[in-house]
Image: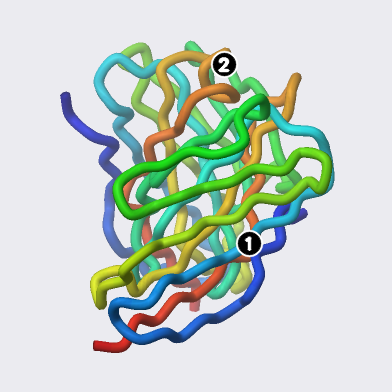
Amino acid sequence: ETGVTQSPTHLIKTRGQQVTLRCSSQSGHNTVSWYQQALGQGPQFIFQYYREEENGRGNFPPRFSGLQFPNYSSELNVNALELDDSALYLCASSSDLAASSYNEQFFGPGTRLTVL
Amino acid sequence: SQQGEEDPQALSIQEGENATMNCSYKTSINNLQWYRQNSGRGLVHLILIRSNEREKHSGRLRVTLDTSKKSSSLLITASRAADTASYFCATSSSGTYKYIFGTGTRLKVLA
């Protein structure tokens, strides 16, 4: 059983640019959630994807968007980057939608985004 | 917004001592989970306790849940230097699909 993987590990962008972060969910998992973790804070929920559809969204503007693919891997896209977008971006997978609120989520190692 | 608030924010103990950290939350929950995070890296799942459970053990970890007080505690016994990390609680509520994390406790275990 493979774990959750994310790429890239680190990324440096400038304000106004666009970025795409990638996540491969754990084998057999069809639900992926994305979180943003600012320095010194707990992770904040961005959105969740289930079977290629966005299932719920946190308090993030529309310039944060995502995709989930038939193999359940996922992308997080952020347009018009701002300095405050600098953070660790984490994805987490769970075995199915119902389980995502009743069972554990498995987190990837994260992508560290720096916006200059 | 943060649902859980961990207490204390930071904790420094000697190796071999026990470490206790607490988490308070605001709304009714399905379950509560504790995670460890080393140096801003990914989150490692430690233990999950469901709303109808009061205590769970896993190795040197002991978690309690008091739904009447909307609080949980994580006890790490016989701490080791390798336990140095940030610890977060995360709650899941009925009818939702997301986990809400607390602000974390930074634990430092001195050798």
Which three-letter amino acid code belongs to the residue tagged 1?
A: Asn
Q: Which residue is tagged 2?
A: A53
Kind of element beneath mark 2 = strand
State the CA–CA distance, disc 1 to disc 2: 36 Å
Q: Position of residue B78 (x, y in %)?
A: 31, 68
Rendered position, B2 above or below A112: above
Residue at image point 41% right, 30% down = A93
* Chain under numbered label 2: A
Quadrant where the image shows the N terminus of chain A: top left
Applied colour scheme: rainbow
Residue at image point 34% right, 26% down = A73
* Chain under numbered label 1: B
Rendered position, A67 above or below A38: above
Q: Position of residue A22 (x, y in %)?
A: 35, 40
Foreground: disc 1 or disc 2: 1
Query: Callout 2: 10 Å neighbours few (<14), some, many (20+)?
Result: few
Query: Callout 1: 10 Å neighbours few (<14), some, many (20+)?
Result: many
- The image's mark for residue B22 is 1
Which quarter of the picture shows residue A69? top left
Q: Depth check: give the residue in front, A104 or A108.
A: A104
Which quarter of the picture shows residue B82? bottom left
Rendered position, B67 above or below B34: above
Residue at image point 48% right, 62% down = B87
Q: Is residue B94 left or right of residue A91?
A: right
Q: Are marks 1 and 2 in contact (CB under 8 Å)?
A: no
Q: Depth check: give the residue in front, A43 or B66.
A: B66
